Amino acid sequence: MNPSPWHAQILTLFPEMFPGPVGSALAGRALADGLWKLDVLNIRDFAMDKHRTVDDTPYGGGAGMVMKPDVVAAALRGAEAQFGRAARRIYLSPRGRVLDQLLVEELAAVPSVLLLCGRYEGIDQRVLDAEGLEEVSLGDFVLAGGEVAAMTLIEACTRLIPGVMGNAQTVDEESFTQGLLEYPHYTRPPVWEGHEVPEVLISGHHEKVRVWRQRQAEALTSLRRPDLWAKWKKVEKR
């Protein structure tokens, strides 16, 4: 029996935004082929009043609106009733753990993820605490909502699902997979506007190519990402 496909569950006020980019190219083809699946729930469907109100003014004053805890909790419980509680439940937030390749690998390895997309000034803290959601961030910047962040997380994870990428070796050699930035790539023609492909890459000597690529990856990482380079050096010394 084939295992169940990786499952992304989305809670959003803008369900029409999905699947968006993850419905195209490799991720979209894999979705159509059943290698992963996507379900999108509209948080507004869980509002309690006739106006389907999902937000209110913040206690303590300040600009903007805050998503109501009762509505968000109802949406979370609705997703649980429909799909079960197996999902790793994540709120996309600039306060969260930064999404890196290690976390992507963790999330791609679980059966399902539930991605809560906030809007306005965010979500009432009480429901985040009560429901035990973990917070994940794309980085030190702010988006209008969590939907684009959710799509980014999904695309990063679905690339790791067996069968999505044409060549599994591609994933093994990408930036961050080995703790370094990826080496430069070249293709035909061998000379373009006076610029030549490095001779070692057309030498046919596989070991020399491997060593060149490793040295290039190390040099790029050292120059552009000293934070990654420091971690790499620590690992090398072990």
Image (cartoon, grey):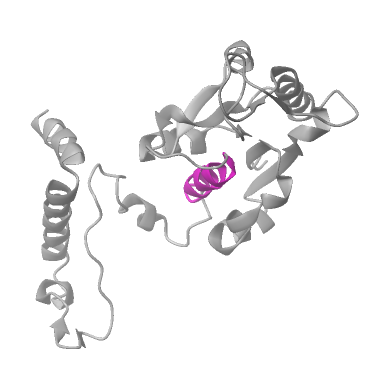
Residue at image location 11% in from the left, 55% down from the top: 215
* x and y percentages locating residue 144 in the rendered image: 55, 42
* x and y percentages locating residue 176 in the rendered image: 30, 45
The span shown in magenta is 146-161
**Quadrant into which the N terminus falls:** top right
Residue at image location 50% in from the left, 26% down from the top: 135
Q: Could you tell me what secondary structure mostly forms the magenta stretch? A: helix
Q: Relative to residue 186, is residue 195 depicted above or below?
A: below
Q: Is residue 47 left or right of residue 122?
A: right
Which corner quadrant of the image does residue 185 belong to? bottom left
Q: Relative to residue 122, is residue 228 depicted above or below?
A: below
Residue at image location 61% in from the left, 12% down from the top: 126
* x and y percentages locating residue 85 in the rendered image: 68, 22
Q: Relative to residue 178, is residue 11 depicted above or below?
A: above
Which corner quadrant of the image does residue 129 belong to? top right
Residue at image location 74% in from the left, 18% down from the top: 70
How many numbered discs sit on the rendered protein? Answer: 0
* x and y percentages locating residue 35 in the rendered image: 62, 50
Is residue 183 found inside the magenta-colored segment of the image? no
Q: Relative to residue 109, is residue 216 depicted above or below?
A: below
Q: Is residue 163 left or right of residue 178?
A: right
Q: Nearest the camera: 147 or 171?
A: 147
Q: Is residue 161 left or right of residue 192?
A: right
**Quadrant into which the C terminus falls:** top left
Which corner quadrant of the image does residue 201 belong to? bottom left
Q: Nearest the camera: 97 or 88?
A: 97
Residue 81 visible (yes or no): yes
